[in-house]
Amino acid sequence: MPTQFPPDERPSDPRAVRTQEALRAAVLRLAAEKRVEDISVSELTAAAGVNRTTFYRHANSAADVLRQALYQDFDVIRAELLTIDNDLENYRAAWVAVSSRIAEHIEHFLPIYRRGLGDDAALSPALMRMAAEHFEASMHGYLRRFPRLIPQVSSQASDALELASARFVAAGSVELMRTWVQSPAPRDPADYAAISMAVMPAWLLAPAPRAAGE
């Protein structure tokens, strides 16, 4: 089944909001110094000034908190992706804009991505999984908007084809992120977008064909 993510609902209690913000700020600092897998709950709660009981009301691990923090930004990019109009002449330009936003996201959180993705000998499986899951869910949403976008192989295999397509694009997107953070500075988001447009499947970057009578 496609991965689904609930909206990031901020708690209404001001104390809960402050706790959530403190945890996210702390995990962003710590994840810039070490892989998120190596951040203990004790270390994170000490950095955030939160006790363990309070922590477990918000998350189960440091990876959970980092996911919440990064997904706040990723969700904005997903919203931009899902508003692309498949029939507009500037369709490719819209994809370039979304790809550039991903590059800007990486640069904004560069210490974290460099720590988790920049060294092949010390990759962070959790960070890679976070990005892949979000990319996959975003692609599912996009492909459901435009079900005729993928070249069909058979009606019986349509569900498997959608899942494989979403996972293929997600995996490629994560590898592009890895390549980007391992590239020497300076890095221009426009170059990231150009590389993305060059390596993504051709069917993804062309407006979906219309059904007869549309």
Image (cartoon, rainbow, N blue to C red):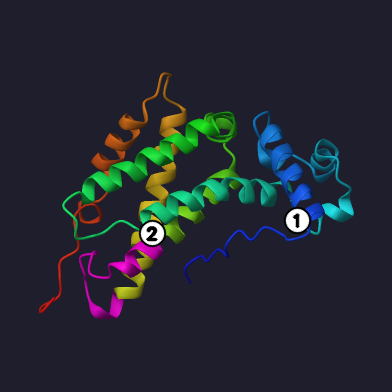
Answer left or right for 202 relative to 164: left
For the C terminus, the image quarter is bottom left
Query: What x and y, as percent, mark residue 140?
Result: 40, 64
Q: What is the crowding at mark 1: few (fewer than 14 residues within 10 Å), some, or many (at least 20)?
A: few
Considering every residue shown, the one lying at the far left of the view is: 213
Q: What is the crowding at mark 2: few (fewer than 14 residues within 10 Å), some, or many (at least 20)?
A: many
- Residue at the (64%, 30%) spot, across then down: 32
Answer left or right for 115 relative to 26: left
The one nearer the camera, 47 or 136, is 47
Q: CA distance from mark 2 to mark 1?
A: 27 Å
Q: Quadrant of residue 6?
A: bottom right
- Residue at the (35%, 74%) spot, across then down: 159
The one nearer the camera, 171 or 10, is 10
Query: What x and y, as percent, mark residue 115?
Result: 59, 30
33 versus 148 height, above or below:
above
The reply to whether the C-beta atoms of the residues labelled 2 and 1 are less than 8 Å apart is no
Query: What x and y, as percent, mark residue 58?
Result: 76, 56
Tag 2 secondary structure: helix
Q: Which residue is mark 2?
A: 139
130 versus 33 height, above or below:
below
The one nearer the camera, 59 or 19, is 19
Tell me which segment is drawn in magenta: 140-157
- Identified by mark 2, the residue type is Met
138 versus 63 height, above or below:
below
- Residue at the (37%, 31%) spot, across then down: 189
Which numbered disc flags the more N-terminal residue, 2 or 1? 1
